Amino acid sequence: MASVLVGQFHARDEEGRIYPVQEFRESQPVAADGTEPVSTYRLAIGDRVRYLGGEEFELVQSGIKLTRVV
């Protein structure tokens, strides 16, 4: 199943570096069993990002913690 880009935002690490993050969602709005589509996050360069909750994220490969810039 394909994913669709649904949003973009910036996140900052503890050292103040800014990362462009993209949010993707499955192309089907609602699955056949009624569950919501899954969101995934990636940096603009393709690195995977894990959502930790609230405004917190983590780069999967390096473990760097990020906070969404509001």
Image (tube, helix red, strand yellow):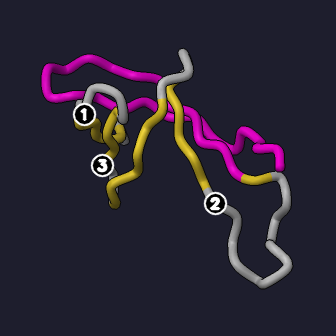
Residue 2, image quadrant = top right
Residue 1 placed where, x, y %? Answer: 83, 50
Q: Residue drawn at (35%, 36%), measured in percent from left and top?
A: 69
> Callout 1, which amino acid?
Gly
Q: Could you tell me which secondary element the residue under label 1 belongs to?
A: loop
Task: Residue under label 1, please give it.
Answer: 63
Magenta region, residue range: 1-25
Disc 2 target residue? 38
Number of marks in the rendered image = 3
Q: Check disc 2 and report its element: helix, strand or loop.
A: loop
Residue drawn 57% across and 34% down? 22
Please state which amino acid type lies under the numbered disc 2. Answer: Val
Q: In which quarter of the view is residue 19 placed? A: top left
Q: Residue at horizontal 59%, vertical 42%?
A: 23
Q: Along the polypeptide, which appears first: circle 3 or circle 1?
A: 3
Q: CA distance from mark 2 to mark 3?
A: 17 Å
Give the amino acid type for the residue marked by disc 3 in the picture: Glu
Label 3 packing within 10 angstroms: few (<14), some (14-19), many (20+): some
Residue furthest out toward the left: 15
> Predominant secondary structure in magenta?
strand
State the image coordinates of residue 36 (x, y, percent, origin top left): 69, 72
Ranked by sequence position, the earlier of labels 2 and 3 is 2
**Residue to which mark 3 is pinned:** 56
Q: Is residue 65 left or right of residue 20?
A: left
For label 3, the SS is: strand
